[in-house]
Image: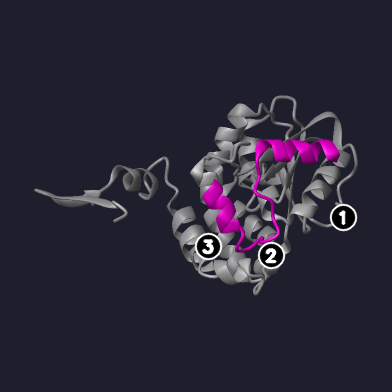
Amino acid sequence: CLRLTEGPGRLGYRNSPNVQKFMVSSSKAYYGDYLKYQIGRLFYGRMGKLVPILRGEEHLNYSSWFSDPSVASTYTQAQHNGSLATAKALFKRVPLKGIRQMLDVGGGSGAFSLQAVRMGDQELKSIVLELPKVCEEGQSLMLTQASEQERRRIRFVELDATEPSWPIQELSQDLVLMSYLCGSVPEELIEVLYRNALKVLKPGGRLVVHDFMVDDSKDGPALGAYWALQHVTVNPNGLGLTPRLVEERLTHS
């Protein structure tokens, strides 16, 4: 039993506290679209293929998966719902004061960029570097989610971020953000991402790696480990991230 409801009582069944908090659309903590569509509709089915993937009998990566417009649309819209709240929490910990130019690598719907222009200085502008189908979906979402002024400060650029070079001027960015990206690419490409990020950063600029990880001891947290396992179904050659592993690859870059 998943304890999704409680009861029976005099008033019948009712939502459990977690369902009431995260699955009711009027809740401030609503994550329902993310849980129903990205996890339920997409990853749940992929997990059924985990064994043949581990055996090397089936291969898939994000670029080929997102070439399907329906997958790109479902994933991006669902992620947008969850990312807006996460981005707000992140930028409370990563100050944006003085940031004028931000590069959002693998930025999906642009949710992190949208929160950045809302929470940062008026001069802050952001470039979202993403796969073509995801860019299309992100631009569509911005028409309803962002004001005209906010849209003018966010630009989508179509590119697979794992390409060896980016169409971004060197030494041009105050902040490079990689959110949920490093755990979604093959291990050998992580340092390629970091090298490209360091090329476009201004002196004194910041590279922020925001992702699901487990502790260096690999004893937990469990949700970080579950997420990494789920990602094996679309990124079988990826790296299970820990803070130390990220730091080592940044140093090598």
Residue 35 visible here = yes
Residue 252: image quadrant is top right
In the picture, the disc for residue 164 is: 1
At horizontal 50% and vertical 46% (from top left) the residue drawn is 223
User: What type is the residue that disc 3 sits on?
Assistant: Phe
Determine contact: label 1, label 2, CB under 8 Å. no
Q: Which image quadrant: the C terminus? A: top right
Q: In the rendered view, does 107 fall on the left or right side of 253? A: left
Q: Please provide percent x and percent y for residue 114.
A: 63, 42
Q: Please provide percent x and percent y for residue 248.
A: 77, 37
| Magenta stretch, residue numbers | 225-253
Residue bearing the label numbered 3: 43
Secondary-structure class at tag 1: loop
48 shown above or below 204: below
How much space separates mark 1 and mark 3, taking CA atoms? Answer: 28 Å
Residue 144 visible here = no
Residue bearing the label numbered 2: 61
The stretch drawn in magenta includes residue 232: yes
